[in-house]
Amino acid sequence: MNRERLMKVLLSPVVSEKAAIAAESGAQYAFRVIPDATKREIGQAVELMFDVKVERVQVLNVKGKRKRFGQRSGKRPGWRKAYVRLQPGHDIDFGGGA
């Protein structure tokens, strides 16, 4: 894969209660990814950026919510989320603490 493309695949980690529980229990991390990313690209991007080994990738599309702004109706945009399971013995530290 193109290294430049892999650097753009991951947009941000998903910070939520559900993602924190998944990270604690099964070395599984959630990321917000670009809409046209494939499972293989996501796995390679995580391995490249965090120097870990990926065991499995699960991808889902999150639908945007309908919102009202006074009398106007609107819709938030949809986005793509990926759950990445790491091989045993590997871990990602987002804090980078000393």
Image (cartoon, helix red, strand yellow):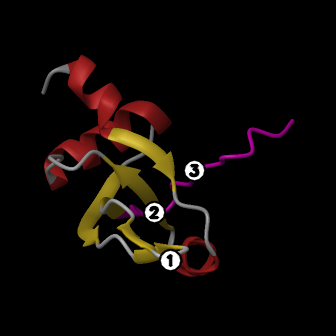
Task: Please state the horizontal and vertical placement of residue 60, each as a whole percent of the image.
Answer: 25, 70
Name the residue beneath numbered marker 3: 92
Name the residue beneath numbered marker 2: 30
Distance of label 1 from label 3 (alpha carbons): 12 Å
Q: Are marks 2 and 1 in contact (CB under 8 Å)?
A: no
Q: With respect to residue 32, does 50 lie above or below?
A: above
Q: Residue at x 45, y 63 (%)?
A: 30
The disc, 3 or 2, on the residue closer to the chain's N-terminal end is: 2
Q: Quadrant where the N terminus lies?
A: top left
Q: Name the image quarter holding residue 17.
A: bottom right
Task: Please state the horizontal and vertical placement of residue 39, each as a whole percent of the image.
Answer: 17, 55
| Residues shaded magenta | 83-98
Name the residue beneath numbered marker 1: 26
Distance of label 3 from label 2 (alpha carbons): 11 Å
The disc, 1 or 3, on the residue closer to the chain's N-terminal end is: 1
Secondary structure under badge 2? Answer: strand
Secondary structure under badge 1? Answer: helix
| Residue 89 colored in magenta in the image | yes
Distance of label 2 from label 1 (alpha carbons): 12 Å
The residue nearer to you, when weighing 98 against 2, is 2
The residue nearer to you, when weighing 90 against 76, is 76
Classify mark 1: residues with Cα within 10 Å, few (<14), some (14-19) or many (20+): few
